[in-house]
Image: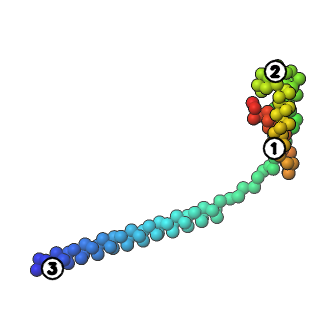
Amino acid sequence: MSSVIKYQKWIYECQQLIYEAEIRKIRRKRILVALVLNEILMCKNKKNSKKQFWIHPLFKLRSDHGFFEAVFPTLSTHSYKFENYIRISISQFEKLLFLVGPMITKKNAVREPISAAARLLITLR
């Protein structure tokens, strides 16, 4: 008789393990569904804020008050200062600009792009 009781007890324990595993699966599925629903709600509630500026007024003045436009003409007139600032001579800068200029020049699509000389100067600095 004791072996029958042990067998029934073993069957009961196995059923408990199976039941607990099923409960864990159901909980996992519920958590996943809750996470997915939360993501969907977050995406719907995200407000697409309209941009205030296409180009900020500060950057519209770049062509007048930018570093390249303000300092480069002065540097290029003084070869010693130019070499001290960029570590190459003016002629080397012009040769390098001639070589890499077409590769670093951007097309004028909507906004005025940064010139190739300014890009090269920033890179070398």
The answer to which quarter of the image holds residue 101 is top right
Asked if residue 124 is positioned above or below residue 19 in the image, the reply reads above
Q: Amino acid at mark 2?
A: Lys
In the foreground, 13 or 87? 87
Q: Please state which of the two labelled residues, at mark 1 or mark 3, is closer to the viewer.
A: 1
In the foreground, 39 or 88? 88
The dot on residue 81 is: 2
Residue for point 29% across, 75% down: 15
- Is residue 16 among the parts visible in the rendering? yes
Asked if residue 6 is positioned above or below residue 121 in the image, the reply reads below
Residue for point 88% across, 28% down: 73
Q: Amino acid at mark 1?
A: Met
Crowd tier of the residue under label 2, counting other residues whose Cα lies within 10 Å: few below 14, some 14–19, many 20 or above: some
Q: Residue furthest top?
A: 80
Q: Secondary structure at mark 2?
A: helix
The dot on residue 120 is: none
Residue identifier under label 3: 4
Of callouts 1 and 2, which one flags the residue occurring earlier in the amino acid sequence? 2
Q: Residue furthest left?
A: 1
- Is residue 116 among the parts visible in the rendering? no
Crowd tier of the residue under label 3, counting other residues whose Cα lies within 10 Å: few below 14, some 14–19, many 20 or above: few
Asked if residue 112 is positioned above or below residue 86 in the image, the reply reads below
Asked if residue 40 is positioned above or below residue 15 in the image, the reply reads above
Residue identifier under label 1: 103
Q: Secondary structure at mark 1?
A: helix
Residue for point 77% across, 22% down: 84
Q: Amino acid at mark 3?
A: Val
Give the Cα distance between marks 3 and 2: 100 Å
